């Protein structure tokens, strides 16, 4: 089976990519409110017994409701892989930066969580391209580091988190 | 635990988590991150990896679990900085080693926040450092 990610990627040169530095997206909204099911599925995967994720009564008294694990925040804004209108989901801006690389991997992530995200919150994210590095050679292959800033909002306009992410967009070593 | 109870420096207990194929598949399913090397072993191999591996959210979630296990149910992670140096693959062990490196009162936002700074590093079973992290946890203060 060959996995095809090409619908997500924009292709171009490093010079094309530099044109996108400073670009900022319109808000991208989660399709549904934060659910207890997603909170607990993730906490189960991580095996985190934090009662803020599991004990609705405790969570309500301490935090105001079941808490979304901070680490899940990016996932709460991921589009589902299929939607009924046949349109490909909108990809993160970091993979829409035009570059030659055919693969991606995360390099670093620095997130600040200003206020807890709770069950029922409707979230959106605005992304900005901060920087694109010149070509670098790594053990994975040659490519470019893309730094983005994501700002996450609740539907009342409050900023709940900011996140600086660095993604490596590369052509795998040995690939032509 | 309250902020007042925290000693600096201090070691956190080592935590070992076995990462099965089920856990890696759960990783893709829970985070909706369907980049193929999180679920397709052949794709992962074609891109130079031995098999599928967990994503950044899984690593961050494990780090947060270490942080709030330390801080207790009234604590929360307010900042986390991670570097991805290596991958945790299906079949690997994920080993967390952490320590308390500081405590401070932050007044930047107007309110007083009682913060503890942790260093948490994730290794694989070969003792290779895969993901060093710095985490700030907010605790309560006082009786």
Image (tube, coloured by chain):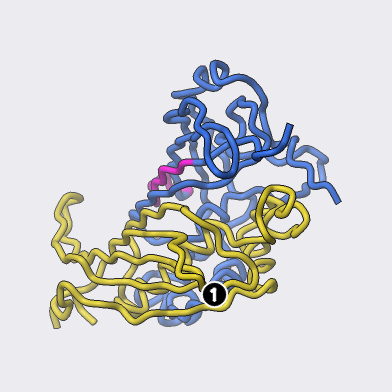
Look at the numbered disc 1 and give the secondary structure of its residue. strand
**In the figure, is residue A5 to the left or right of B15?**
right
Quick check: A7 above or below B110? above
Q: Which residue is denoted by mark 1 in the rendering?
A: B93
Which chain is yellow in the rendering? B
Residue A143 percent across, percent down from the top left: 56, 32
Residues A154 and B14: in front is B14
Residues A59 and B7: in front is B7
Quick check: B70 above or below A24? below
Quick check: B45 above or below A101? below
User: Which residue occupies 53% across, 64% down?
Assistant: B58
Residue B53 percent across, percent down from the top left: 62, 61
**What's the colour of chain A in the image?**
blue
Q: Quadrant of the N terminus of chain B?
A: bottom left
Magenta region includes residue A159 = yes
Residues A79 and B26: in front is B26
Q: Quadrant of the C terminus of chain B?
A: bottom left
User: Which residue occupies 14% across, 62% down?
Assistant: B104
**In the figure, is residue A7 to the left or right of A117?**
right
**Magenta-colored span:** A155-166
Magenta region includes residue A125 = no
User: Which residue occupies 51% across, 27% down?
Assistant: A135
Mark 1 falls within which chain? B
Residue A136 percent across, percent down from the top left: 50, 32
Single out the residue that lies furthest toward the right.
Answer: A1
User: Which residue occupies 19% across, 62% down?
Assistant: B113
**In the figure, is residue A79 to the left or right of B40?**
left
**In the figure, is residue A13 to the left or right of A51?**
right
Give residue A168's quadrant in the image: top right
The crowd level at tag 1 (other Cα within 10 Å; few <14, some 14-19, many 20+) is: some
Residue A160 percent across, percent down from the top left: 39, 51
């Amino acid at each position: 089976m060959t996995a095809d990610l090409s619908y997500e990627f924009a292709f171009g040169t490093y010079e094309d990519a530099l044109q996108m530095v400073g670009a900022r997206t319109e808000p991208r909204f989660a399709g549904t409110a934060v659910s207890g099911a997603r909170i607990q599925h993730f906490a189960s995967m991580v095996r985190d017994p934090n009662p803020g994720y599991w004990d609705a009564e405790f969570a309500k008294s301490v935090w105001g409701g079941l808490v979304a694990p901070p680490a899940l925040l990016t996932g709460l804004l991921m589009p589902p892989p299929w939607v009924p209108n046949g349109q490909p989901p909108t990809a993160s801006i970091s993979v829409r930066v035009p570059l030659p690389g055919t693969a991606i991997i995360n390099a670093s992530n620095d997130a600040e969580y200003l206020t807890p995200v709770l069950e029922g919150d409707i979230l959106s994210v605005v992304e900005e391209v901060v920087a694109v590095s010149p070509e670098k050679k790594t053990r994975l292959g040659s490519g470019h580091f893309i730094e983005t800033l994501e700002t996450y909002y609740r539907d009342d306009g409050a900023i709940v988190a900011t996140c600086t992410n660095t993604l490596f967009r590369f052509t795998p070593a040995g690939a032509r | 635990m309250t902020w007042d109870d925290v000693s600096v420096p201090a070691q956190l207990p080592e935590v070992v988590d076995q990462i099965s194929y089920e856990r890696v598949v759960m990783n893709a399913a829970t985070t909706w991150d369907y980049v193929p090397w999180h679920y397709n072993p052949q794709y992962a191999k074609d891109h130079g990896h031995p098999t599928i591996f967990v994503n950044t959210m899984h690593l961050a979630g494990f780090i947060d679990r270490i942080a709030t296990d330390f801080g207790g149910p009234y604590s929360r992670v307010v900042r986390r900085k991670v570097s991805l140096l290596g991958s945790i693959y299906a079949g690997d062990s994920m080993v967390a080693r952490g320590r308390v490196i500081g405590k401070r009162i932050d007044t930047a936002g107007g309110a007083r926040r009682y913060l503890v700074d942790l260093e948490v590093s994730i290794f694989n079973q070969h003792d290779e450092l895969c993901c060093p992290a710095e985490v700030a946890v907010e605790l309560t203060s006082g009786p």
